[in-house]
Image (tube, rainbow, N blue to C red):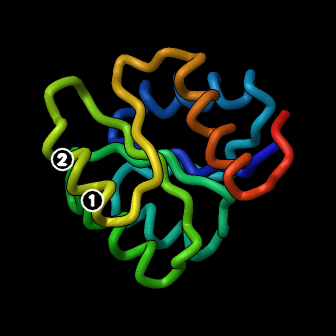
């Protein structure tokens, strides 16, 4: 089981991801509605993993990834993007994101991405 911080400006998307992750045996320990809040909550909660939306107000996801990874080089971040954001996905990977999932979320793809990162770290998978 991983502890996860869910970051998305849409409450509905956070709720949907939280439900998928909990069904997959993981614990959502925090939520953030923009990148600035995500940076603060990451430092406070130190989750095993973060799901990060790309397009958000105040601070976009790619900038939040850069800031989190600058202070926590071992941070594992999965980007969440809408279709047609391939260029931004490349920027996110270059900023330090480990994987990406596409909206609308497919439950099996979300769990596969989380579990893949945990396995890569040698962590147990539910």
Q: Residue 88 shows which numbered tag?
A: 2
Q: Position of residue 25 (x, y in %)?
A: 80, 31
Q: Is residue 117 above or below residue 114?
A: below
Where disc 1 sits, the SS reads helix
- Image quarter of residue 80: top left
Please name the residue that numbered disc 1 is placed on: 62
Counting other residues with Cα less than 10 Å from the Cα at mark 1, is it few (<14), some (14-19), or many (20 or more)?
A: many
Report the side of 28 relative to 106 (left or right): right
* Residue at figure coordinates x 71%, y 48% from the top left: 118
Which numbered mark, 1 or 2, is in the foreground of this view?
2
Where disc 2 sits, the SS reads helix
Q: Position of residue 21 (x, y in %)?
A: 66, 30
- Image quarter of residue 79: top left
* Residue at figure coordinates x 33%, y 55% from the top left: 93
Counting other residues with Cα less than 10 Å from the Cα at mark 2, is it few (<14), some (14-19), or many (20 or more)?
A: some
Q: Residue 107 shows which numbered tag?
A: none
Q: Nearer the viewer, residue 17 or 116?
A: 116
In three-dimensional space, the C-alpha distance between marks 1 and 2, rounded to whole angstroms, equals: 8 Å
């Amino acid at each position: 089981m991983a502890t996860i911080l869910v970051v998305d400006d849409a409450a509905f998307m956070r709720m949907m991801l939280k439900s998928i992750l909990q069904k997959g045996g993981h614990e959502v320990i925090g939520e953030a509605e923009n990148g600035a809040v995500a940076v603060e909550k990451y430092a406070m909660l130190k989750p095993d993993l973060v799901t990060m939306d790309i397009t958000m107000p105040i601070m976009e996801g790619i900038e939040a990834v850069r800031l989190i990874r600058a202070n926590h080089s071992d941070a594992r971040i999965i980007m969440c993007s809408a279709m047609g954001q391939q260029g931004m996905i490349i920027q996110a990977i270059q900023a330090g994101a480990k994987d990406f999932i596409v909206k609308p979320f497919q439950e099996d793809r979300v769990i596969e991405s989380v579990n893949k990162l945990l396995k890569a770290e040698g962590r147990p998978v539910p």
